[in-house]
Image: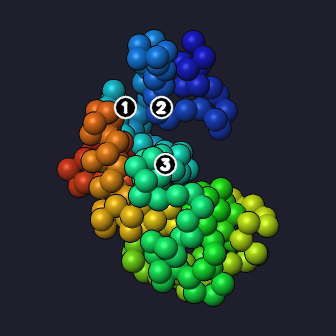
Amino acid sequence: ERFAANFQRADHCREVGAALTVFHGERCIVDLWAGHMDASRVQPWHKDTLLNVYSTTKGIVAVCVAMLVDRGVLSYDDAVASVWPEFAQNGKQHITIAQVLSHQAGLPAFDEPTTIKDLFDWPGRCAALARQKPRWVPGEKTAYHPITYGYLAGEIVRRASGRRSIGEFVQQELATPLAADFFIGLAPALQRRAAET
């Protein structure tokens, strides 16, 4: 009833499309979807509609790092530069993987002007972060790294996993084994299933 009520609201918070699935252990106890995939409310939402999950992806990326720690490939106390040597520039030689994962690296945003197009240039964004000076002494402060976290932690995974992109790592190590419909980087063939953002 609460889920359905979001589609009946008369204010600006009226839902366009949404889904909710709840598991108790391995048992699915709630599986709801409703509304539309587009703002014009033409394409109906389906059980398998994909949507951008934004910052919750950080948790998935942190799990990837944890898997590499569990396998002995990385340690949280390792300097990022131990797997990404170029990162050691401008006083970042001692930043640890733990500091990156806990938003203490001092790199919460790009200092260089960055366009939307630039965000699709993984090597370029990682090179920019490698050149950048931290905004504070790493480990002394915490500030949410909303845009840079994926590049920082994702590049650690890429370097430590044999140059697999974070998207490839997620697919091979998490999504496929768990039969999870989750992607970092969506193949063109799957775009038709994606809700508008």
Residue tagged 3: 66
| CA gap, disc 2 and disc 1 | 7 Å
Mark closest to the chain's N terminus, 3 or 1: 1
Q: Which residue is mark 2?
A: 18
Kindly identify the amino acid type of the residue bearing the numbered disc 3: Ala
The residue indicated by pointer 1 is 45
Q: Position of residue 147 (x, y in %)?
A: 57, 64
- Disc 3 crowd rating (10 Å Cα; few below 14, some 14-19, many 20+) is some
Give 104 or 7, whichever is nearer the viewer: 104
**Outermost front residue:** 72
Q: Give me the residue at 46% from left, 16% from top.
A: 25
Please name whichever residue, 39 or 96, is drawn nearer the observer in this view of the structure: 96
Q: Is residue 80 above or below residue 59?
A: below
Of tags 3 and 1, the one toward the viewer is 3
Inter-mark Cα distance, 3 to 1: 34 Å
Residue at 73% over, 77% down: 135
Q: Quadrant of the N terminus?
A: top right
**Residue 57 can be seen in this image:** no
Asked if one can make out residue 65 in the rendered structure from this viewpoint, the answer is yes
Within 10 Å of disc 1 (Cα), the crowding (few <14, some 14-19, many 20+) is many
Give how far across and how far down residue 76 sits, in percent: 57, 57
Task: Tell me the SS state at disc 2.
Answer: strand
Residue 78 located left or right of residue 144: left
